[in-house]
Amino acid sequence: MTAPANQPFLPRIVVAEDHPVCLLVLEDQLNGIGGCEVTACETGVDALAELERAPAAMLLTDISLPGIDGLALARAVRAGRAGQADPRLPIVVISATVGPAERLACDEARVDLVLTKPVSFERLRSVVQRYLGSPG
């Protein structure tokens, strides 16, 4: 993905979250961190379509999503079935239900990191910096 000549390239983060308030909070936090373009999706199907439409630098996803859940989405990316998505794309699960079974399922889907909701601004900023470098 290239940016127009008058705009700098910003890494794109695809966020898949079906709860409108949680999605808004994640968008606001990522916009506050800066240095990235945020693509918000309310379903796993929409997130997969966005990953196919244009390259992304990171995927943030909930586990429970309508249509394609977050783990199926992660497996599709890792299998190279997400169009242009890089199978090495950093995938971070953010979920309210993260018990031992969910962590094992995330490991099996080759998720990079699992976070429990709510995620603080500072924690999200450290995750973005870890995978994308210093924002801005």
Image (cartoon, rainbow, N blue to C red):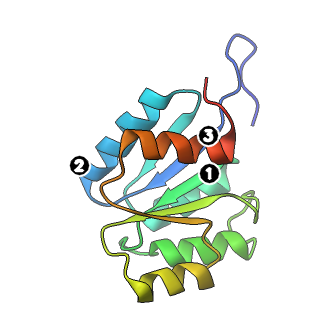
Q: How far apart are marks 3 and 2 (CA)?
A: 24 Å
Question: Can I make out residue 50 in this image?
Answer: no
Image spot of residue 19 (x, y percent): 26, 58
SS assignment at label 2: helix
Image spot of residue 129 (x, y percent): 61, 40
Is residue 84 found left or right of 122 in the rendered image?
A: right
Which residue has dot 1 on it?
A: 58
Residue drawn at point x = 76 percent, y = 59 percent: 86
Which residue has dot 3 on it?
A: 129
**Which amino acid, mark 3?**
Gln
Which residue has dot 2 on it?
A: 21
Residue drawn at point x = 58 percent, y = 33 percent: 36
Q: In which quarter of the image is the N terminus?
A: top right
Q: Please report whichever mark, 2 or 1, sits nearer to the chain's N-terminal start.
A: 2
Quadrant of residue 92 in the image? bottom right
Image spot of residue 131 (x, y percent): 66, 48
